[in-house]
Amino acid sequence: MPSSPKFFHARTPPQPTHPTRSTLLIFSALLAFAILSFIFALSSFLSSGGSGFRCRYSDPRSVRVLWDKSANSNNVATAAGGGDDAGTKRHKIMGFVGIQTGFGSTGRRRSLRKTWMPSDRQGLQRLEEATGLAFRFVIGKTNDKSKMAELKKEVAEYDDFLLLDIEEEYSKLPYKTLAFFKAAYALFDSEFYVKADDDIYLRPDRLSLVLAKERSHSQTYLGCMKKGPVFTDPKLKWYEPLSSLLGKEYFLHAYGPIYALSSDVVASLVALRNDSFRMFSNEDVTIGAWMLAMNVNHEDNRALCEPECTASSVAVWDIPKCSGLCNPETKMLELHQIDTCSKTPTLPSDDDDE
């Protein structure tokens, strides 16, 4: 008679001489998991272009700025292509430098990336960490599909652009400048916003020291200042009554190749409606007129308009011969080979520049 299944016989069962079924099942499951993990990792690697891990630099740096053009929007900027939160998160930095460029300036951008502006994303990130300054090329759009296609390739390769939703035309530079300041303010929480042209030789480390200087004025217009004749442009006739009152025929404004506006000044520009701005033919005159109307503090710094490299020069260009370097594509490379331009140690900023 067979024993009852309720009884347990305490004896050691014989050791199996071959794998049990449960062992085989566990081994098969582990093997399948390993294969699936390998396939997932391989597909991720291939989808990233075989570039390996890019944890820190995975977020796109180039941003396309869109405008809300509804009646009461005041053209508020939002970002696309810069991550899911690009339109809401303002990145905190000391200074944002927008390098104004155009569709015919591919050679200039190439020269800049070979000199003072890094051509790779990691280098650009290191420069930002060392100086507190972020750098992007600023450009609008065009109806020329071939030019837009070339720009798209350049953006994909270098990822260092701020793309504005505005027509890129020389006659509309004042409009582009205003659009730049509004877009930069929407994207970056910065102490200063710097407008720079793509045909100057710049020392980012020295610019950082200039911007970091303590100031008693929260509304600052920083640049290499000049006094321009009021009546060189017929559109400036509006200034005549004020000119008579002040007994002046000139007003102070910064040279166009590089100047900076403090955060409070840009915030005021952003708050104003577009139709409240008077646009003139020259971009630097236009900004100067706005700054005059806003009664901001003018800070003159001659290191921003040096004709040659010195121990303290911040921006070098062929003043007054050209509004920038006269032959920027080659001159930029030549200057970078001069130790005084690229290797001179950075000196403390001069507090007597005001």
Image: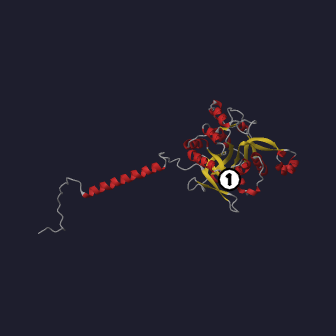
Whole-percent x, y for residue 217 in the image: 73, 47
Q: In this view, does 20 lie above or below 122?
A: below
Whole-percent x, y for residue 240 in the image: 86, 49
Q: Quadrant of residue 134?
A: top right
Query: Left or right of 147: which side holds 223?
Result: right
Front one among 254 and 350: 254
Q: Which residue lies furthest to the left in this view?
A: 1
The colour scheme is: secondary structure
SS of the residue under disc 1: strand
Q: Residue at x 45, y 51 (%)?
A: 44
Q: Which residue lies furthest to the top in this view?
A: 339
Front one among 108 and 128: 108
Query: Left or right of 243: which side holds 81?
Result: left
Q: Which residue is drawn at 82% across and 47% down?
A: 233
Whole-percent x, y for residue 247 in the image: 88, 45
Q: Quadrant location of the C terminus? A: top right
The amino acid type found where label 1 is placed reads: Ile
Whole-percent x, y for residue 9 in the image: 17, 62
Q: In this view, does 3 lie above or below 181?
A: below
Q: Quadrant location of the N terminus? A: bottom left
Front one among 263 and 217: 263
* Observer able to see residue 206: yes
Q: Mark 1 points at which residue?
A: 166
* Observer able to see residue 296: no
